[in-house]
């Protein structure tokens, strides 16, 4: 069974700073997808960034980038120039190739301080 | 384009009462998911539909939970009778590609059982 671990229940940073959220996962699969989803307070969860395990290049989306370390089974999210709108719960998630079941971590509550 | 719509947003009931949640996915999304999100936890899959067929309901407590997706569009999740431990947020999501594709979530239905 796959597991996803987010070891930081809460984090806070000053606006405009850079913050990194950690995620580790456990799987015997060699091909899979990894995701970071954002859940703002009282709003729906949205996809932040997606990484395919067979791609060596780390995914980036504007101010969001990942550090994917396949051997270490680590998938951290870096948010640069953090903004107040980045305040949210962030969930790391995993799904193997050919499998539709998404496994989520327990989340990290990120607060951006003005 | 309209997103995933869920109703009601909030529901308070007494234990042993029935409750139903409704979800309208994004048009054209054949895959529909119901997730359970307990406080401080990541979402956990309850059931997944491909069109009108429930293809993964292994995590659905079938003694009290039921779901349907008539005509492969809207879906309803029912709990009867509700228990105190059912207090949680019930999330509906849909996707165009169930194999590693992006999930689009609704705002969720928050259930409180007294």
Image (cartoon, rainbow, N blue to C red):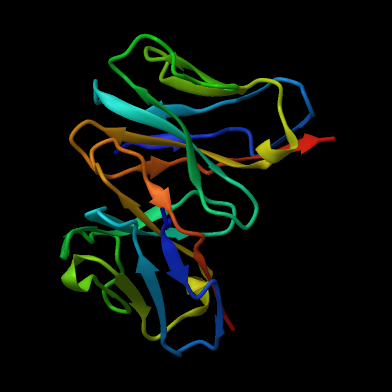
Examine the rendered structure and indicate whether residue A89 appears above or below residue B91. Answer: above
Quadrant (top left, top right, bottom left, bottom right) of the C terminus of chain B: bottom right
Q: Is residue A78 visible?
A: yes
Question: Closest to the observer: A98 or B31?
Answer: B31
The extreme top residue here reads: A56
Query: Is residue A14 toward the left or the right of residue A94 in the image?
Result: right
- The spot of residue A99 in percent (x, y) is 21, 39
Examine the rendered structure and indicate whether residue A107 appears above or below residue B94. Answer: above
Query: Is residue B22 toward the left or the right of residue B54 in the image?
Result: right
Query: Is residue A110 toward the left or the right of residue B71 in the image?
Result: right
Q: Residue at x 29, y 69 (%)?
A: B74
- The spot of residue A42 in percent (x, y) is 62, 58
Q: Can residue A27 be seen in this view?
A: no
The extreme right residue here reads: A114
Q: Quadrant of residue B35?
A: bottom left
Query: Is residue B54 toward the left or the right of residue B2 in the image?
Result: left
Q: Residue at x 30, y 37 (%)?
A: B101
Q: Which residue is drawn at 37% across and 12% down?
A: A71
Q: Which residue is drawn at 23% across and 70% down?
A: B69
The extreme front residue here reads: B1
Examine the rendered structure and indicate whether residue A57 appears above or below residue A41. Answer: above
Q: Quadrant of residue A80?
A: top right
Total numbered labels placed on residues in the image: 0
- The spot of residue B23 in percent (x, y) is 37, 68
- The spot of residue B40 in percent (x, y) is 59, 52
């Amino acid at each position: 069974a796959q597991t996803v671990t987010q070891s930081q229940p809460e984090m806070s940073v000053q606006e405009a700073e850079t913050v990194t959220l950690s995620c580790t996962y456990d799987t015997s699969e060699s091909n899979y997808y990894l995701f970071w989803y954002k859940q703002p307070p009282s709003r729906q969860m949205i996809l932040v960034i997606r990484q395919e395990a067979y791609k060596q290049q780390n995914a980036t989306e504007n101010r969001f980038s990942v550090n994917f370390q396949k051997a270490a089974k680590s998938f951290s999210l870096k948010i640069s120039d953090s903004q107040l709108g980045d305040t949210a719960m962030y969930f790391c998630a995993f799904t193997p190739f050919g499998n539709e079941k998404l496994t989520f971590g327990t989340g990290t509550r990120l607060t951006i301080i003005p | 384009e309209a997103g995933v719509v869920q109703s009601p947003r909030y529901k308070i009931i007494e234990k042993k009462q029935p409750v139903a949640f409704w979800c309208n996915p994004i048009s054209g999304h054949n895959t529909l998911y119901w997730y359970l999100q307990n406080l401080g936890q990541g979402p956990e899959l309850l059931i997944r539909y491909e069109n009108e067929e429930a293809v993964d309901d292994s995590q659905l407590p079938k003694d009290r939970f039921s779901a349907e997706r008539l005509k492969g569009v809207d879906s309803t999740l029912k709990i009867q009778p509700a228990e105190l431990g059912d207090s949680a947020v019930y999330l509906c999501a849909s996707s165009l590609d169930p194999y590693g594709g992006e999930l689009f979530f609704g705002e969720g239905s928050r259930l409180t059982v007294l």
